[in-house]
Image (tube, helix red, strand yellow):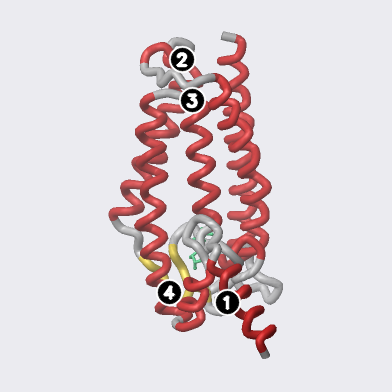
Amino acid sequence: MVEELLFRILFVAIWTIFAGVRIYYRRKSTKPTDTGDAPQIKKKQKLGWMLLVLSIGILGMIISIIVYLLMPLWILWFPIPLPSLVRWIGVILGFCTVPFLVWIHRTLGRFWAADLEIKEDHTLMTSGPYSRIRHPMYTVFILFTLSALLIASNLFVTVFAIIVILMFYPISIKEEEMMLDQFGDEYRDYIQRTGRFLPSLRQVKISDSDQGIENSK
Ligand code: SAH
């Protein structure tokens, strides 16, 4: 029972830090620029049903987590008996997502948006976390949600967490349609050398073959 309490405390710590980082960068990205203007939005893409399902998933997760945290017997009602080690892996995973979230926000800067948007002077970021993965922020969200699922090891949290995780796939497709429309061939090339949620090995292969061409010259 002491370990269960520890999991709950660590759970709250991870969520608090993650939410703190998120709120900080959210404020920063919507702040007016040096010239005094607020960032101008050029295009906006509606997420429609995807946003609805994602919101239901997130809300369901939050409610089940609050119940999980406040009701000592909750874990005994709908448990998924994961081994302690797996739950500790969830704790480590949760903490590890935080520096990546900071790195991604710092790279994306004011081009970040809660919705799918193209700003007036939008440029395509292809460095840092974006050099090998097209949606590193969604990868971080997926891992963060997975960490919640593992730590809570509870049926309700798991069901809502799976809904949230699955939704990032159609959202990423919609986002890529918008990016292709905006950046055309530049984004098409970018797709070729990157992976959606995991690093692509193709970039290595391309540079290897370039190397081969260089050597044969
Ligand atoms: N899907 C990305 C970004 C999420 S934030 C990720 O998971 O990291 C959503 C906003 O980021 C969108 O409005 C889009 O305009 C912007 N965006 C996505 N990829 C980008 C890139 N490579 N360079 C610049 N802006 C990008």
Q: Residue 203 appears in which quarter of the rendering?
A: bottom right
Q: Secondary structure at mark 3?
A: helix
Q: Amino acid at mark 1?
A: Thr
Q: Residue placed at 55% from the left, 59% from the top?
A: 199
Please name whichever residue, 71 or 160, is drawn nearer the observer in this view of the structure.
160
Q: Which residue is mark 3?
A: 152
Q: Position of residue 93 (x, y in %)?
A: 60, 37
Q: Which residue is mark 2?
A: 71
Residue found at the far front of this picture:
216
Whether the residue under disc 1 has CB within 8 Å of ligand 1: yes
Please name whichever residue, 200 or 95, is drawn nearer the observer in this view of the structure.
200
Report the Cα–Cα distance between label 3 and label 1. 40 Å
Q: Which residue is mark 1?
A: 123
Q: Residues within 10 Å of mark 4 (few under 14, many from 20)?
A: few
Report the Cα–Cα distance between label 2 and label 3. 12 Å
Is residue 162 rendered to the left or right of residue 23? left
Q: Are marks 2 and 1 in contact (CB under 8 Å)?
A: no
Q: Secondary structure at mark 2?
A: loop
Q: Earlier in the sequence, mark 2 or mark 3?
A: 2
Q: Position of residue 111 (x, y in %)?
A: 57, 67
Q: Secondary structure at mark 4?
A: strand
Q: Earlier in the sequence, mark 3 or mark 1?
A: 1
Q: Earlier in the sequence, mark 1 or mark 4?
A: 4
Q: Residue 116 appears in which quarter of the rendering?
A: bottom left
